[in-house]
Image: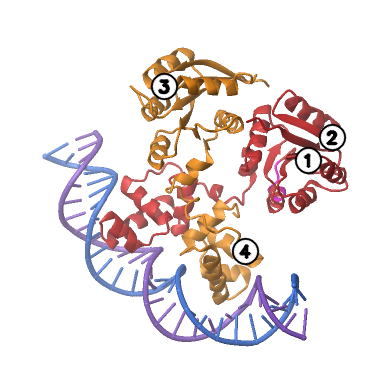
Chain colours: A orange, B red, C purple, D blue
Amino acid sequence: MHTIIKVIIVDDHRMFIEGIISLLDNNPDIEILGTAADGKAGIKLLEKEKPNVVLTDVEMPKVDGITFTKYIKNHHPDIKVIALTSHCNGTIIDKLKSANVDGYLLKKTGKIELLNAIYRVVSGHTYFTKEAVEELKNSLLKAEGKNNDVTLSPRELEVLKLICYEKNTATISEELHISINTVESHRKNLMRKLGVKNMIGLVKYAIKEHIV
Amino acid sequence: MHTIIKVIIVDDHRMFIEGIISLLDNNPDIEILGTAADGKAGIKLLEKEKPNVVLTDVEMPKVDGITFTKYIKNHHPDIKVIALTSHCNGTIIDKLKSANVDGYLLKKTGKIELLNAIYRVVSGHTYFTKEAVEELKNSLLKAEGKNNDVTLSPRELEVLKLICYEKNTATISEELHISINTVESHRKNLMRKLGVKNMIGLVKYAIKEHIV
DNA sequence: ATAATGCTCACGGTTTCTGGTGATTTTATT
DNA sequence: AATAAAATCACCAGAAACCGTGAGCATTAT
């Protein structure tokens, strides 16, 4: 199967567009249909060319990237949108997410990450660059990421899993054939080790670390 | 920046190796250093060639893919491992995860997904194919997916987010300038609407639905 | 052999959550 | 204007979680 991915690029910096093109143009899977210098021109281009993917700047004259993204997602939900900015900004990422953007990259990104993002959004996933995710203090799972190299014992992992399945202490104690006090000890040790203040933190850790 | 990704392929089906090669060999970013027909030969090849990525079958003679993965991750944690199987199996995925595999694909996968997976693991992420994730009944977030078309009010969403940030009721009431009773009402309504029995369920829903 | 870790259990006290029930006001929809 | 939904608040009682502290036993590593 050989699917050509059709792309348009929208950015008011000509130099940057050239950079993107140079990263993509020798790739047989990707075809660049055209470019535009602002959101308004982008809409026009997009209506004419019907791309699979739109790479768009966020700060642009006339129609900014967020409004542009909203337009695309409202009128052509199948077209994937990857937003690019020079610097991370949590508020902007939040707004882009609300606009249902599919990906978010920094302009300093390299070829591999760009291709990675394109392939990902084309296959129906999302891609948000690592820096963006870090920046997003609102991002639940990554926030307060200070539990570095903790190792949980097998028993602690068992308790953690059962906690994640919404089981209370009494039920866990029955299922593991240990006393309630012991379950509570494990839970306390888990919270201490992971530096969280309640079971919410435990669940977030478990999901983040793919324990469940 | 132009980084060549060095790959070895380990599989006891010669045909399959040829298939992978045909998908990758015209890609200037990827170099295939060699192939092996079982885990034991794979170890030998890997020690000699020092690849960036190992694509390995799971069911193999002599040394199976799980043991192989464990070996790689113990001795060369920087080498990325992507496991491939013909059919999904939750137990196997579980074991691979315990062995710290970086990616998991089905053999019927196409070029885009394969490249996607390679780029992803090279950039330090993991990649598990959609089918694999679905298969994993143990996967917390997918389990009991019966809360279909509930709609949460804006205020409920706010409360839910703050709950996810490990904030207790008193803190939430202060931040939203409402009484503790009100926060508790919202929380109760959330639990009722989503059909969960405690805040753990709320957090899981929030993460699953990308609310946080 | 000694130390460290993990697993087990206990007790008492405080805080928080859970569940039920009911009510008022505002906002949106029809 | 009437209805529905959302947001607000109250009270109470029981369940569960949180916190600290201490301790015995087995296994493993140094």
Q: In the image, what residue type sits under mark 1?
A: Asp
Instruction: Judge by depth and name the residue closer to the eye, B154 or B18.
Output: B18
- Specify whether residue B87 is in view: yes
Are the residues at dot 2 and dot 1 in contact (C-beta closer than 8 Å)?
yes
Q: Nearer the viewer, mark 1 or mark 3?
A: 3
Q: In which quadrant is the N terminus of chain A drawn?
A: top right
- Specify whether residue B129 is in view: no
| Residue position for label 3 | A12
Instruction: Tell me which corner region of the image, top left, top right, bottom left or bottom right, holds residue C16.
Output: bottom left
Instruction: Judge by depth and name the residue closer to the eye, A125 or D30.
Output: D30
How many C-alpha atoms fall within 10 Å of the one at disc 1: few (<14), some, or many (≥20)? many
Q: Is mark 4 on a helix, strand or loop?
A: loop
Give left or right: position of B127 versus B211.
right
Are the residues at dot 4 and dot 3 in contact (C-beta closer than 8 Å)?
no
Q: In the image, what residue type sits under mark 4?
A: Leu
Q: Which of marks 1 and 4 is in front?
A: 4
Q: In the image, what residue type sits under mark 2?
A: His
Which chain does the numbered disc 1 sit on?
Answer: B
| Residue position for label 2 | B13
User: What residue is shown at x 37% (from left), y 62% (from top)?
Assistant: B168
On residue A200, the disc is none
| Residue position for label 1 | B57
Magenta residues (range): B88-92
State the CA–CA distance, disc 2 to disc 4.
Answer: 38 Å
How many C-alpha atoms fall within 10 Å of the one at disc 3: few (<14), some, or many (≥20)? some
